[in-house]
Image (cartoon, rainbow, N blue to C red):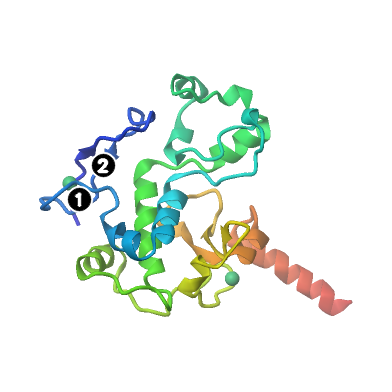
């Protein structure tokens, strides 16, 4: 599908670093929209729509309590800029600890990747049992990118058990029971993302999935040999 990709003005102080672009089909009617496929979820399940937007475009939030510990979340594409460039946007990387800088830099991804991730996550969310039925234009749009949608076909990226849409609403200490997960935590792109149970995502940690499975397997082998 050819996209409109007209610039959408935003009030973000980071707007000059990366223009927001319309993701509607080229030649569309009506207003430009960066997340047209989220319009329906924004009405039916606004927290899910907000989560998809946030997880696709922002670095993960961390419990960095103090001011000097750094921004809780920042646009992933900003983390592709140099320290000098970031300073012009009021982000002082030098003031942050090396550990925080490494965490933030690891989450860097370009704008196009983030847009692909948001689309892929929406396509996956609609295929969870219990998900709302997508409006026809949204279904057609998403299927044009990722193929036909079948309910009950979205599994936890890590443990491969089915994921129910209700898990989004199941929040403990403000964290949903389903999280955005990465096969390789250092790559943020559509081919590498999915949803996972919160506990599965935590267990995987910084390992790639193959590393994680090998680690589990070795543990089980030792347990069995004991
Ligand atoms: Zn447009
Ligand atoms: Zn799982």
Residue 2: where, in percent of width, then height? 18, 52
Q: Is mark 2 within 8 Å of ligand 1?
A: no
Residue 124's place in the image compared with 175, above or below, is below
CB contact under 8 Å: marks 2 and 1: yes
Label number found at residue 144: none
114 left or right, relative to 166: left
Q: Name the one closer to the observer, 45 or 119.
A: 45
Q: Residue 167: horizontal and vertical position, in percent?
A: 52, 70
Instruction: Residue under label 2, please give it.
Output: 21
Q: Is mark 1 within 8 Å of ligand 1?
A: yes
Mark 2 neighbour density, 10 Å: few (under 14) some (14–19) many (20 or more): many
Quadrant for the C terminus in the image: bottom right
- Which residue is label 1 attached to? 3
Residue at the image position 40 percent from the left and 56 percent from the top = 190
Spot occupied by residue 111 in the image (x, y as percentages of width and height): 36, 42
Mark 1 surroundings within 10 Å by alpha-carbon count, few (fewer than 14), some (14 through 19), many (20 or more): few
**Quarter of the figure with residue 131:** bottom left
Residue 118: give x, y in percent of width and height. 38, 55
Asked if 190 appears above or below 154 in the picture, the reply is above
Residue name at image x 56 percent, y 52 percent: 185
State the image quarter where residue 211 is shown.
bottom right
Q: Earlier in the sequence, mark 2 or mark 1?
A: 1
Query: Which quadrant is the N terminus positioned in?
Result: bottom left
**Front one among 13 and 196:** 13
Calculate the distance from the C-alpha at mark 2 to the C-alpha at mark 1.
9 Å
């Amino acid at each position: 599908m050819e996209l409109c990709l007209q610039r959408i003005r935003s009030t973000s102080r980071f707007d000059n670093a990366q223009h927001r672009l319309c993701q509607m089909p080229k030649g569309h009617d009506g207003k430009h929209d960066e997340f047209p496929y989220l319009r329906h979820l924004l009405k039916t399940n606004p927290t899910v729509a907000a989560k998809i937007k946030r997880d696709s475009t922002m670095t993960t939030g961390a419990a960095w309590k103090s001011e000097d510990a750094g921004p809780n979340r920042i646009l992933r594409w900003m983390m592709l800029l140099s320290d000098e460039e970031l300073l012009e946007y009021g982000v002082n990387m030098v003031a942050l600890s090396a550990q925080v800088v490494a965490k933030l830099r690891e989450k860097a991804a370009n704008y196009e990747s983030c847009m692909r991730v948001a689309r892929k996550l929406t396509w996956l969310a609609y295929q969870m049992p219990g998900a709302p039925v997508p409006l026809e234009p949204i279904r057609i749009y998403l299927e044009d990118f990722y193929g036909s949608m079948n309910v009950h076909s979205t599994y936890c990226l890590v443990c491969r058990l089915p994921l129910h849409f209700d898990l989004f609403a199941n929040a403990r200490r403000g964290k949903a029971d389903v999280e955005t997960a990465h096969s390789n935590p250092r790559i943020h792109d559509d081919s590498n993302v999915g949803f996972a149970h919160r506990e599965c995502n935590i267990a995987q940690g910084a390992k790639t999935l193959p590393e994680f499975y090998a680690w589990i397997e070795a543990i089980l082998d030792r347990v069995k040999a004991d």
